[in-house]
Image: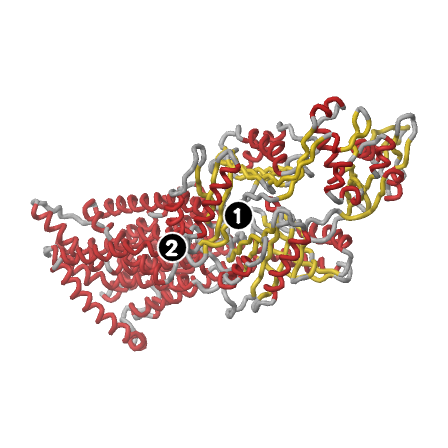
């Protein structure tokens, strides 16, 4: 007995196996992580180095370039970028995709340790950088407590606790004041006592010090030795003795004012116009964001009641809810598609038993698929669930073929068990053949590397798993149920009554189709010319389809990035930001508005701010794109303000704006002039908005030009000058002050009154071998303008001109930009390159294009092997270009740009549209070998196979309709692939009934003309 017979004749065994598969699938599904997208691991490492008080040019020379030089020697480095800001250096390193991220981070850390950095620079921090990392939740706290105390409470009781929640990687806290012990020196006292700020700092560090000093034993008892030199109170700190020459000393309070104050405020956080504390949470790579979100909320429910009175909390955004809704919407569409598929089968077959069968076998195959998904380490994300949903209609096709054949044998009078065996065995080879073609197209996708391989491997393998399980169900579970459900007496009266209207429509369509097929076979050249014209016309209007890397998603958020003049203070930036903040809060459908002034990370600066607008989750509200549009002219009217407005989720791992043009070269002036020309060009391109560049000048800078002759005579170096000047103005850290288990910086500097104006700088005292000398006697002070940040790409200075797009797509504006960019002259040694979304399109569309070509080749070879004919395989593959007739109009009519999701749909179509042609040509060859003329054989094949073809196409299309509608969260990710598939199936599937017959006729005409002798053998079996 074979597998089919065993499954039919041993129903309990079959049912037990099915139940086990379903239980294991449900168990695996319960433990799967949940994320919006698969984890895309790009070997990306960041190095952050803090050097307080240093300007961008000093940071570039002393920190960024040495680190770049060290890292560039590591094998596998693909790209190096650096950003040099005031007091901070960021170096980003991208490795080849086959490099292990952990090994790459270790290699970078080892190289960075060998770099000789300035003494006062902090140790570089090397981190594995997740290009997909983004905040998944924002939590806002308002309080009536003093900001300093409130921040300590939130750090200890909230931030620390939330960081321990499963799948939470990082919790950042913005807002409030940070306690700082400030030692403000009196320059007159320093000069009279012969002390320098560096000496005082070193003495304070060594005096305010505690440390274990060993062990000592006495008999059976051992004691720990510990020197406790730290001051317990600020008052004790004032009493520290500063030694002078001659064996005398003075109290710290005699030369400085010691205050328990707060650090300089360089960042402001607000929510709905009130000073607030904002916590931003990030998840671990490949973490379960939904689980993390729930864990955070549960933790907050326990923490908030324990906080002192005066705290209120709100959560303006939570990605966990959006992701959960997006994933549920896929399952919702899948369930709807299954129900519609069952309805279509009922209309065609007129049997409620078939509907019941479908309702049982389809969920079985889908649920069982979760077993290999868990073993493969996949999460429940948009790609894996979309793989299940998009193949729902395809899954049922195998069972349809089996069920229809079993019904045919039942109607011939066979016993249900025998009918099930005969019907299943007869159609088994055909089922295996169609399954093979469906699977063949996903092999290149599953095996492809790079970012697209990581993105679509879960999708492709999920389709493979589900298709294999549908094959297993179709050959075992389906015939077992079909043998025991339903009768062989034909449709019931009720079924005939309910489906009568449909049968009338179908019969009319059948007659029309028969006439059309006769017409195409009778006039083959005219028919081929018509279809060729339709295909050519579809290709001609392809330029009306926009192109983008990742679909834009309305997540109910709008982000406004604002940048004032380089010389702006925090207060000035705040005043300008408040104008936009107040305007936005007055708008309808706004749920919340948070503001962070001062930037963060590589986008830090007193002149930078980010305003995030959260819209209400109601159907009446405008989309985030519509809400953002009127903000742009309002922002453009603000003086001394550069801004950009971003609506949508910003997913897909593309950093920055959509359009990024990089100009590389050595001379900053040449780079800047070229960048201005590129900006002017971009502003002329329709649909391009928020044009800007990342090179910032205009920040006032006072340069000290050392008098080398005088400084040489005084044994005073430029390094000493820079070090002491930074100490006077910015301050030097002199250890920490510990209280209540927390550490607070001790900062030594001149009093604010002594360095409150640039006019006071020339009189600052500097200790030399000849005593204290003023700054004006050591160096020339010159007012100039300097950059606020310096960017380098691949160890070369660069300027990036970037822009957003509105009302169009990146692909459309790229065609215009690329043409105009070639008209801008470049000096020798300078070059243009693309970054951002354009670069992603260039890098990844080519990968998918190669996968498409390989899928076509594999499908062709599989069909040739099945039919034992290269000629007929070529004829069948003609249905692939025919699918363009449906794909292009479908995208244009629905106003859907082509994206990586749409391209994946095109690849999937290759394995779907050929099945109809296989079925037609297979039957035509059988009829021809039985004595029919090729013309009559192909007409008869179209007539006999019309019903199963329409059933297969209708179930596949109808199952995708809910996905194509894109209703609810995540709809923009689901709809492109479904729209492409629906258009392609309708055109490539239904039109194959009209396009393949004339080609088949011409093929046999040519064969007969060249005397071809036909071998009498079965093709499919």
Q: Which residue is mark 1?
A: 132
Q: Note whether 670 is above or below 960 in the view shown.
A: above
Q: Earlier in the sequence, mark 1 or mark 2?
A: 1
Q: Which mark is residue 305?
A: none
- From the viewer's side, name the closer residue of 818 and 368: 818
Residue 110, given in percent of the width and then of the height, sits at 60, 30
**Are the two marked residues, 1 and 2, in contact with CB atoms closer than 8 angstroms?**
no
Q: Which one is closest to the eye, mark 1 or mark 2?
A: 2
Give the Cα separation between the discs numbered 1 and 2: 25 Å
Task: For mark 1, give the secondary structure.
Answer: loop
The part of the image, by quadrant, that contains residue 67 is top right
Which is nearer the eye, 307 or 399? Answer: 307
Residue neighbourhood size for the residue with mark 2, other residues' Cα within 10 Å, grouped as few (<14), some (14–19), many (≥20): some
Residue at 38% in and 64% down: 961
Badge number at residue 546:
2
Q: Image check: 168 left or right of 6?
A: right
**Near-viewer residue (1018 or 1001):** 1001
């Amino acid at each position: 007995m074979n597998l089919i017979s065993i499954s039919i004749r041993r129903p309990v065994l079959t049912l037990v196996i099915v139940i086990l598969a379903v239980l294991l699938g449900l168990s695996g599904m319960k433990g799967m992580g949940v994320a919006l997208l698969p984890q895309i691991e790009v070997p990306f490492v960041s190095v952050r180095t803090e050097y307080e008080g240093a300007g961008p040019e000093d940071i570039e020379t002393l920190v960024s370039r040495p680190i770049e030089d060290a890292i560039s020697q590591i094998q596998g480095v693909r790209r190096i970028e650096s950003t040099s800001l005031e007091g901070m250096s960021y170096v980003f390193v991208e490795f080849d995709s086959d490099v292990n991220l952990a090994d790459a981070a270790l290699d970078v850390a080892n190289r960075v340790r060998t770099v000789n950095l300035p003494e006062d620079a902090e140790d570089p921090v090397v981190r594995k950088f997740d290009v997909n990392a983004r905040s998944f939740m924002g939590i806002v706290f308002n309080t009536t407590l003093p900001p300093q105390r409130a921040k300590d409470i939130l750090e200890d009781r909230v931030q620390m606790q939330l960081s321990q929640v499963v799948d939470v990687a990082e919790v950042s806290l913005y807002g409030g004041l940070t306690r700082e012990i400030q030692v403000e020196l009196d320059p007159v006292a320093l000069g009279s006592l012969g002390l320098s700020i560096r000496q005082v700092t070193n003495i304070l560090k060594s005096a305010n010090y505690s440390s274990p000093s060993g062990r000592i034993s006495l008999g059976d008892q051992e004691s720990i030795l510990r020197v406790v030199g730290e001051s317990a109170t600020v008052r004790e700190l004032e009493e520290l003795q500063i030694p002078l020459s001659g064996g005398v000393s003075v109290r710290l309070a005699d030369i400085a004012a010691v205050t328990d104050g707060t650090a300089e405020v360089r960042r402001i956080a607000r929510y709905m116009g009130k000073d607030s504390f904002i916590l931003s949470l990030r998840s671990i790579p490949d973490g379960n964001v939904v689980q993390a979100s729930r864990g955070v909320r549960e933790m907050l429910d326990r923490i908030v009641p324990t906080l002192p009175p005066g705290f209120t909390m709100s959560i303006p955004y939570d990605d966990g809810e959006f992701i959960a809704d997006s994933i549920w919407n896929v399952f919702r569409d899948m369930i709807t598609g299954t129900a519609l598929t069952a309805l279509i089968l009922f209309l065609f077959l007129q049997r409620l038993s078939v509907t019941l069968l479908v309702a049982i076998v389809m969920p079985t195959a889908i649920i069982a698929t979760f077993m290999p998904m868990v073993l493969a380490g996949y999460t429940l994300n948009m790609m894996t669930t979309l793989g299940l949903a998009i193949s729902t209609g395809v899954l049922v096709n195998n069972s349809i073929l089996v069920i229809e054949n079993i019904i045919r044998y039942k109607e011939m009078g066979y016993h249900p068990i025998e009918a099930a065996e005969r019907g299943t065995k007869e159609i088994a080879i055909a089922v295996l053949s169609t399954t093979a073609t469906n699977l063949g197209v996903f092999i290149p996708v599953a095996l492809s590397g790079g970012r697209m391989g990581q993105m679509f491997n879960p999708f492709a393998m999920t389709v493979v798993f589900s298709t294999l399980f549908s094959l297993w169900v179709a050959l075992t579970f389906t015939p077992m149920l079909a043998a025991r459900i339903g009768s062989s007496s034909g449709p019931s009266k009720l079924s005939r009554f309910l489906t009568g209207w449909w049968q009338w429509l179908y019969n009319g369509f059948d007659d029309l189709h028969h006439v059309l097929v006769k017409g195409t076979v009778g006039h083959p050249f005219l028919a081929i010319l018509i279809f060729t014209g339709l295909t050519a016309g579809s290709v001609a209007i392809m330029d009306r389809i926009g192109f983008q890397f990742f679909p834009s998603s309305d997540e109910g958020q709008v982000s406004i990035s604002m940048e004032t003049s380089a010389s702006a203070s925090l207060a000035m930036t705040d005043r300008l930001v408040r104008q936009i903040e107040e305007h936005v809060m007055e708008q309808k459908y706004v749920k919340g508005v948070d503001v962070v002034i001062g930037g963060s990370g590589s986008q830090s600066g007193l002149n930078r701010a980010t305003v995030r607008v959260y819209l209400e989750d109601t159907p009446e509200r405008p989309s985030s794109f519509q809400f953002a549009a009127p903000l742009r002219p309002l922002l453009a009217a603000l003086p001394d303000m550069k801004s950009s407005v971003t609506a949508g989720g910003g997913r897909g791992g593309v950093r920055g704006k959509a359009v990024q043009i990089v100009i590389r070269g050595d001379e900053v002036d040449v780079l800047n002039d070229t960048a201005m020309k590129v900006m002017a060009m971009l502003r002329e391109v329709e649909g391009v908005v928020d044009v800007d560049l990342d090179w910032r000048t205009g920040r006032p800078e006072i340069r000290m030009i050392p008098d080398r002759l005088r400084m040489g005579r005084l044994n005073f170096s430029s390094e000493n000058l820079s070090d002491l000047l930074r100490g006077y103005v910015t301050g030097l850290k002199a250890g920490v002050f510990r209280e209540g288990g927390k550490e607070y910086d001790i900062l030594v500097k001149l009093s604010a009154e002594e360095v409150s104006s640039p006019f006071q700088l020339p009189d600052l005292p500097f200790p030399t071998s000849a005593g204290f000398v003023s700054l004006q006697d050591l160096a020339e002070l010159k007012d100039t303008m300097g950059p606020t940040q310096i960017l380098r790409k691949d160890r070369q200075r660069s300027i990036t001109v970037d822009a957003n797009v509105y009302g169009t797509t990146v692909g459309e504006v790229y065609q215009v930009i690329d043409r105009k960019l070639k008209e801008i002259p470049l000096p020798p040694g300078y070059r243009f390159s693309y970054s951002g979304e354009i670069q992603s399109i260039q890098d990844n569309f080519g990968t998918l294009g190669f996968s498409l070509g390989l899928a076509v080749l594999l499908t062709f070879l599989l069909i040739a092997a099945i039919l034992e004919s290269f000629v007929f395989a070529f004829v069948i593959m003609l249905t692939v270009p025919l699918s363009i007739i449906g794909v292009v109009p479908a995208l244009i009519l629905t106003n859907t740009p082509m994206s990586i999701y749409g391209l994946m749909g095109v690849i999937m179509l290759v394995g779907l549209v050929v099945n109809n042609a296989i079925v037609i040509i297979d039957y035509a060859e059988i009829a021809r070998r039985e004595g029919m003329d090729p013309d009559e054989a192909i007409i008869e094949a179209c007539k006999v196979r019309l019903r199963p073809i329409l059933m297969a196409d209708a179930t596949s299309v109808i199952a995708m309709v809910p996905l194509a509608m894109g209703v609810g969260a995540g709809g923009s990710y689901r709809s492109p692939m479904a729209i492409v598939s629906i258009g392609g199936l309708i055109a490539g599937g239904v039109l194959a009934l009209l396009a393949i017959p004339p080609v088949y006729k011409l093929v046999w005409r040519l064969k007969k003309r060249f005397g071809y002798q036909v071998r009498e053998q079965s093709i499919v079996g």
